[in-house]
Image: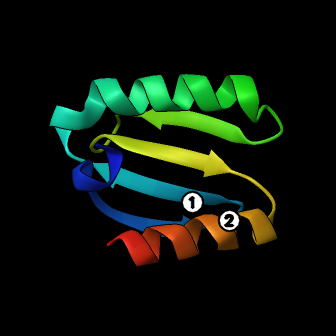
Amino acid sequence: MLCEDITGFRREAGALVVRYAPAGADLFRAFAEAERRCCSCLGWFIDDDGGPQLRIVAEPSQLDAFEQLLSRAS
């Protein structure tokens, strides 16, 4: 499950960066690919430099919503 693999997250200018355990890499890649198809107005990027992470690029209000969801899940 995605939530179990999340090791932390942080807000950056224009993005929310979600760090996850290496064991969840395949699941996060599949998640990002699915989200690119249904929510193409947002940016969904897997970045393995400096540790596995998902970078979500969106409007500030959209990032606020994602951040609230992650805060509740952790």
Q: Is residue 13 visible?
A: no
Q: Are marks 2 and 1 in contact (CB under 8 Å)?
A: yes
Spatial CA distance of label 2 from label 1 is 6 Å
Tag 1 secondary structure: strand
Q: Which part of the image, by quadrant, shows the N terminus?
A: top left
Location of mark 2 (residue) = 63
- Residue 71: horizontal and vertical position, in percent? 44, 77
Q: Is residue 56 visible?
A: yes
Tag 2 secondary structure: helix
- Residue 17: horizontal and vertical position, in percent? 49, 56
61 left or right of 17? right
40 left or right of 65? right
Q: How many marks?
A: 2
Image quarter for residue 3? Answer: bottom left
- Residue 36: horizontal and vertical position, in percent? 67, 27
33 left or right of 41? left
Q: Which part of the image, by quadrant, shows the C terminus?
A: bottom left
The mark found on residue 51 in the picture is none
Which amino acid, by three-letter code, is at mark 2?
Answer: Leu
Location of mark 1 (residue) = 16
Q: Residues within 10 Å of mark 1 (few under 14, many from 20)?
A: many
Which residue appears at 31% of the width and 40% of the height?
Answer: 52
Q: Nearer the viewer, residue 48 or 40?
A: 40
Which residue appears at 35% of the width and 37% of the height?
Answer: 49
Which residue appears at 83% of the width and 38% of the height?
Answer: 41
Which amino acid, by three-letter code, is at mark 1?
Answer: Leu
